[in-house]
Image (cartoon, grey):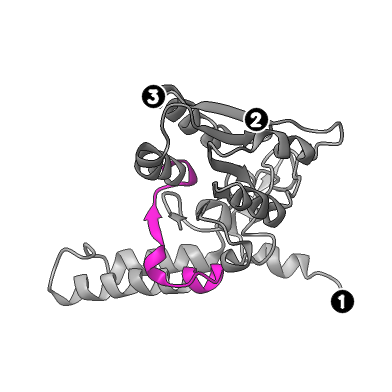
Amino acid sequence: MSFPVEKVRADFPVLTREVNGLPLAYLDSAASAQKPNQVVDAEAEFYRHGYAAVHRGIHTLSAEATQRMENVRTQVAAFLNARSPEELVFVRGTTEGINLVANSWGSAQVHAGDNIIITEMEHHANIVPWQMLCERVGAALRVIPLNQDGTLHLEHLDALLDDRTRLVAITQVSNVLGTENPVAEIVEKAHRAGAKVLIDGAQAVMHHAVDVQALDCDFYVFSGHKLYGQPGSACCM
């Protein structure tokens, strides 16, 4: 069965534009995805008829807005197959979610002489928070190198892991190369060494189903704006 390209394009109003006399072909969704009519209309309807502060009022509009937000938390939990909606924290972006983990869990659990492992293909959002944490507490930041074909040199992970490894922070799919990492295998190795695992899923959740229970990761972070949602929406689990 052929993919209904024209039907899908019709959902995105920006794709009615022409650039240099040709129909717009948008190829920058790795940075931020365009928004379909369904998202634009739902957001406009909320602003027109339902806007109110959430968890900060007892009037009807506030109660309705709060319920809508909590319904989204339940939907996202089902989307990720999380154990409970209470595992999910809404944040403004993947960067903020990773920083939240680094500055809360990381500040409490990572100490001088410990180490954190990342990969050579990480987005800056999954590098800088760990650099800053390691510098602050006196821990070491270790890096898994890449093979010539853009895949991870996984044998190197075995050499980097030890009993002082507190966290392995890894992207599920590279935002530059598109490499899909064997995160389940990495989680298993890290847990065997006693380390926690954070997965940056910003480039993964829109391409295939994610089951955080099957992955058995400790933290999973992704953004809404790359998943056709509005800017300033993201989730840290």
79 on left or right of 8: left
85 on left or right of 2: left
What amino acid does circle 3 point to?
A: Arg
Secondary structure category for the residue under label 2: strand
Per the image, the residue denoted by label 3 is 136
Name the spot of residue 166 as percent of width and height, x first.
51, 41
Whichever of labels 3 and 2 marks the residue nearer the N terminus, that label is 3
Query: Given the current orientation, which residue lies at the most extreme left position?
Result: 58
Residue 221 position (above or below residue 129): below
What amino acid does circle 1 point to?
A: Met
Are the two marked residues, 1 and 3, in contact with CB atoms closer than 8 angstroms?
Answer: no
Residue 133 position (above or below residue 182): above
Per the image, the residue denoted by label 1 is 1
What span is colored magenta in the figure? 76-96
Residue 46 position (above or below residue 93): below
Residue 137: within the magenta?
no
Labels 2, 1: front one: 2
Are the two marked residues, 2 and 1, in contact with CB atoms closer than 8 angstroms?
Answer: no
Residue 95: within the magenta?
yes
170 on left or right of 131: right
Secondary structure category for the residue under label 3: helix
